[in-house]
């Protein structure tokens, strides 16, 4: 079945440094890759997404890159701030209709050291 | 615009009891999902509904049933709760055309004793 692997499971970076989280997916038919941020006690929040026809997308301090050949995609956070501390999930979606599914990675706990 | 609303936020059940978790979205989305989240295991799909009137099993459907009541509402029922169903449950929805990312509710923390 479809699978999404996410690394690392925990990440600690100094405030102001960059953080990178990587995911690989198994289903070559996957065409949409969202990233979510989950703060303690809250539901996941969509922060950025990328489609399979795009190699990179950036939104202020957050960027996502996609390598379809290698079937992996990454989240890059630059100039990290304390409020970036959270659990981040990647996901991969297959299909073009509303009948498609989303498969999630296991999450990365990001901690920003002051 | 409330997004995705789940009720209740917290629930404690005794083993064997039944209950229904409610979910409603006001974004006119076609697809709705139920996930459970357990420590160290991320999010796992229980059931989803591609559109009103259809439901399909996800990764972990055993012990659950769902009903897509209308386009807005998607409920999850535990017929006979078990301690293994202690978890945080999230409802989510997504549109089908431009942006397919799922929007999540705040979650229901369920404890089965």
Image: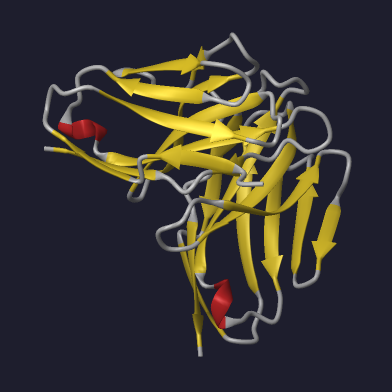
Work out whether residue B45 or residue A71 is closer to the camera in this orientation and state it: B45
Q: Residue at x 63, y 21 (%)?
A: B71
Render colour scheme:
secondary structure
Q: Is residue A50 above or below residue A18?
A: above
Residue B36 image-quadrant placement? top left
In percent of the image, x 59 and y 9: which residue is there? B53
Q: Is residue B89 visible?
A: yes
From this viewpoint, which residue is outermost toward the top?
B53
Indicate the position of residue B26 as horizontal and vertical percent values. 65, 36
Name the residue at the front extreme. B1
In this rendering, position of residue A77 left or right of residue A59: left
In screen coordinates, is B14 left or right of B90? left
Residue beneath the point at 69% across and 40% down: B101
Q: Nearer the viewer, residue A50 or B13?
A: B13
Residue farthest bottom in this picture: A114
For residue A3, say whether it is visible.
Answer: no
Left or right of B100, for residue B49? left
Q: Is residue A31 above or below residue A11?
A: above
- For the residue pair B76 and B73, the one nearer the viewer reads as B73
Please provide percent x and percent y for residue B37. 39, 42
Instruction: Classify residue B63 by image quadrant.
Output: top left
x, y percentage for residue B102? 63, 39
- All told, the count of numbered labels is 0
Whether residue B6 sits left or right of residue B32 in the image: it is left
Q: Please provide percent x and percent y for residue A23.
A: 61, 49
């Amino acid at each position: 079945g479809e699978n999404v692997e996410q690394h690392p499971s925990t990440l600690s970076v100094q405030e102001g440094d960059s953080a990178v989280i990587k995911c690989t997916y198994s289903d070559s038919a996957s065409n949409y890759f969202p990233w979510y941020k989950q703060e303690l006690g809250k539901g996941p929040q969509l922060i950025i997404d990328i489609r399979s026809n795009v190699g990179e997308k950036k939104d202020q301090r957050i960027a996502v890159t996609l390598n379809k050949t290698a079937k992996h995609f990454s989240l890059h956070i630059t100039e990290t701030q304390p409020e970036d501390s959270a659990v981040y999930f990647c996901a991969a979606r297959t299909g073009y209709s509303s009948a498609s599914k989303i498969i999630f990675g296991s999450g990365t706990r990001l901690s920003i050291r002051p | 615009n409330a997004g995705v609303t789940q009720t209740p936020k917290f629930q404690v059940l005794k083993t064997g009891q039944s209950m229904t978790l409610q979910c409603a979205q006001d974004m006119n989305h076609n697809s709705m999902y139920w996930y459970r989240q357990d420590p160290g295991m991320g999010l796992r799909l229980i059931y989803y509904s591609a559109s009103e009137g259809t439901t399909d099993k996800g990764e972990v459907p055993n012990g659950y049933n769902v009903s897509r009541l209308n386009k807005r509402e998607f409920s999850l029922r535990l017929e006979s709760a078990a301690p293994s169903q202690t978890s945080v449950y999230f409802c989510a929805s997504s549109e089908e055309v431009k942006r397919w990312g799922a929007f999540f509710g705040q979650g229901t923390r369920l404890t089965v004793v």
